[in-house]
Image (spheres, grey):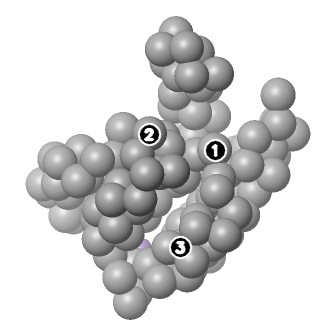
Amino acid sequence: MSKKILIVEDNPQNMRLIEMALSAEQHTLLEAANGEEAFEVAKKERPDLIIMDIQLPKMSGLEVTRKLREIREFSRTPIIAITAYAMRGDEEKALDVGCNAYLSKPIQARDPPNLIAKMWLQRQEEGKG
Ligand code: MN
């Protein structure tokens, strides 16, 4: 079933890689290139899942996630963090603020589809569709 996925990434190459990785599925892909935009697009579009880079201009992915989790509609939206190898500790911080999982850079083309499939499955088992 087609879902709405918001990809938050300020690096155009990574954005393109993730979009290509997800292009085989019939999902609607939305983009945001900084934290403020991510927050606005999320509130407006209510995506089914968010892929969230942590290192972002204007507002970090951690801050965006923290703010979204304060909003009732986003209390259970799956959020997958993208963490950089150079920023060790980001994985733990991402989970602490409410991300459900993380992808570590460099991202491999097969990583996003695999992880997203796993998240849908998890949601189904929880009875959330
Ligand atoms: Mn970044």
Count of number-bearing discs: 3
Q: Bin the neighbour count of mark 1 within 10 Å (Cα to Cα): few under 14, some 14-19, many 20 and up.
A: some
In the rendered image, is residue 17 in sight? no
The mark nearer the N terminus, 1 or 2, is 1
In the rendered image, is residue 27 in sight? yes
Find disc 1 in the rendering and name its residue: 48
* Callout 3–callout 1 Cβ contact below 8 Å: no
Q: What separation in Å lies between label 1 and label 2 (alpha carbons)?
A: 10 Å
Residue depicted at 19% across the width and 64% down the height:
87
Q: Quadrant of ligand 1?
A: bottom left
Per the rendering, the mark at residue 40 is none
The kind of residue on which mark 1 rests is Asp
Residue depicted at 40% across the width and 87% down the height:
57
The kind of residue on which mark 3 rests is Ala
Q: Where in the figure is residue 62, as x and y percent of width and height?
A: 29, 65
Q: Quadrant of residue 84 in the image? A: bottom left
Find disc 3 in the rendering and name its residue: 38
Q: Compared with residue 35, is residue 101 higher up or lower down, i.e. above or below?
A: above
The kind of residue on which mark 2 rests is Arg
Find disc 2 in the rendering and name its residue: 76
Q: Secondary structure at mark 2?
A: loop
- Report whether 79 appears left or right of 54: right
Q: Bin the neighbour count of mark 3 within 10 Å (Cα to Cα): few under 14, some 14-19, many 20 and up.
A: many
Q: Where in the figure is residue 89, as x and y percent of width and height?
A: 12, 54
Q: Compared with residue 79, is residue 15 higher up or lower down, i.e. above or below?
A: below
The mark nearer the N terminus, 3 or 2, is 3
Q: Quadrant of the N terminus?
A: top right
Q: Compared with residue 22, is residue 33 higher up or lower down, i.e. above or below?
A: below
